[in-house]
Image: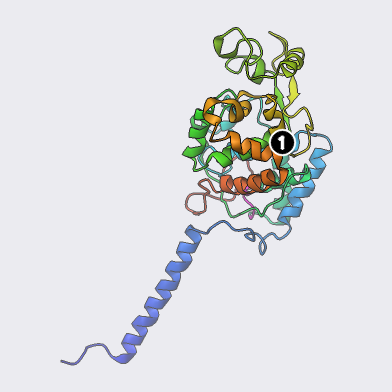
């Protein structure tokens, strides 16, 4: 029996299928674009330099801003992925991550992010996401402080939700090594990432509350013993006790790295080697019993080789930046104001 389809109709059907296939590919691409370094090359080619200039200007009046901006990126990525959620203000029915205990009173730099966003909106409106601003600002902050540079992978969209409860479970300065490892593993990061990313504590400031108040009291009542933390170097403890007296002002700021407080280098690790890590979470990387054979050898390597630290830090920042990025337009957007959804 002869076919009911003529050669012409078969050819037309093939053409239709081809068009549908291409359309499907385009739709898939829009939903699942991978992050890439050149994401803004065609749509906002000056994005990196615009961010950099705003940060340089901000640093003139705030020497802490570089460390603060990398902390914002860290606290963003560890809570429902790198989606700019930490930047959202309170909205009806949604409490901001800014108000959770790990962020309230310590996370800072929001006004600088606003300034970056404003400059980018002037240059290329509706193009660069707030989540990507945090990633770019973190790299620039490290590089301008003497640290390594790396190719920042871009193309994140901004999420439309904030996770107040989730932000209460961020890695904390008083936690032991086992807990820290568990929290890093939960977001797909390993021991090298844990030790390398902790190295961001090579610059910046921290309040006395993180070394002299419960649950982080290393100076006067460590773990409820009414004694100081035995892993804390005695001379360093005496120095910190002057800075942070018992029942003193818990908001007084201290250098995380007393050696080179504003320079991104490997002194964080050389300090830990001699029991001068400021935070419990810092010293645990070297002194915890479980650290031997896990994180302690990595600390040793980074203390002896700044190049090794820089290379690992750059890769770990890329790894962290890949935590659950929003790339599906149905799940995210490019906010015109980082503090609220469009």
Pointer 1 residue = 67
Q: Is residue 95 visible?
A: no
Give the quarter of the image for residue 285.
top right
Q: Nearer the viewer, residue 94 or 244?
A: 244
- Tell me where residue 218 appears, x and y as whole percent: 63, 16
Q: Is residue 297 left or right of residue 67?
A: left
Between 321 and 124, the one lying in front of the other is 321
164 in the magenta segment: no
Q: Could you say which quadrant of the image residue 98 lies in? A: top right
Query: How is the rendered protein coloured?
Result: rainbow
Please state which of residues 86 and 13 is positioned toward the viewer in this rendering. Answer: 86
Write down the region rendered in magenta.
Answer: 127-132
Total labels: the figure holds: 1
Tell me the quarter of the image containing the N terminus.
bottom left
Q: Is residue 22 visible?
A: yes
Q: Is residue 129 magenta?
A: yes
């Amino acid at each position: 029996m002869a076919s009911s389809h003529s050669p012409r109709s078969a050819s037309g059907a093939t053409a239709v299928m081809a068009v549908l296939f291409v359309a499907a590919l385009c739709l898939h691409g829009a939903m699942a674009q991978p992050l890439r370094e050149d994401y803004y090359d065609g749509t906002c080619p000056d994005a990196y330099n615009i961010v950099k200039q705003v940060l340089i200007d901000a640093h003139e009046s705030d020497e802490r801003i570089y460390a603060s901006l990398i902390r914002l990126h860290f606290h963003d990525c560890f809570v429902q992925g790198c989606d700019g959620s930490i930047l959202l203000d309170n909205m009806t029915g949604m409490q901001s991550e800014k108000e959770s205990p790990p962020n309230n009173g310590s996370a800072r730099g929001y006004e600088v992010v606003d300034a970056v966003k404003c400059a980018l909106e002037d240059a290329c409106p509706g193009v660069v996401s707030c989540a990507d601003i945090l990633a770019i600002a973190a790299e620039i902050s490290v590089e301008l402080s003497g640290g390594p540079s790396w190719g920042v992978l871009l193309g994140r969209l901004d999420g439309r939700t904030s996770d107040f409860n989730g932000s209460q479970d961020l890695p904390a300065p008083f936690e032991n090594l086992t807990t820290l490892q568990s929290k890093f593993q939960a977001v797909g990061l390993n021991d090298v990432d844990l030790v390398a990313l902790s190295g961001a504590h090579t610059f910046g400031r921290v309040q006395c509350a993180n070394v002299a108040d419960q649950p982080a009291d290393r100076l006067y009542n460590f773990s409820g013993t009414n004694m100081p933390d035995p892993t804390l170097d005695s001379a360093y403890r005496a120095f910190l006790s002057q800075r942070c007296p018992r029942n003193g002002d818990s908001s007084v700021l201290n250098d995380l790295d007393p050696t080179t407080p504003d320079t991104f280098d490997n002194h964080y690790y050389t300090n830990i080697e001699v029991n001068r890590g400021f935070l419990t979470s810092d010293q645990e990387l070297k002194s915890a019993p479980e650290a031997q054979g896990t994180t302690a050898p990595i600390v040793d390597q980074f203390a002896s080789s700044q190049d090794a630290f820089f290379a690992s830090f750059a890769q770990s920042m890329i790894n962290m930046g890949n935590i659950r990025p929003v790339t599906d337009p149905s799940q995210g957007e490019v906010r015109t104001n980082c503090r609220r959804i469009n």
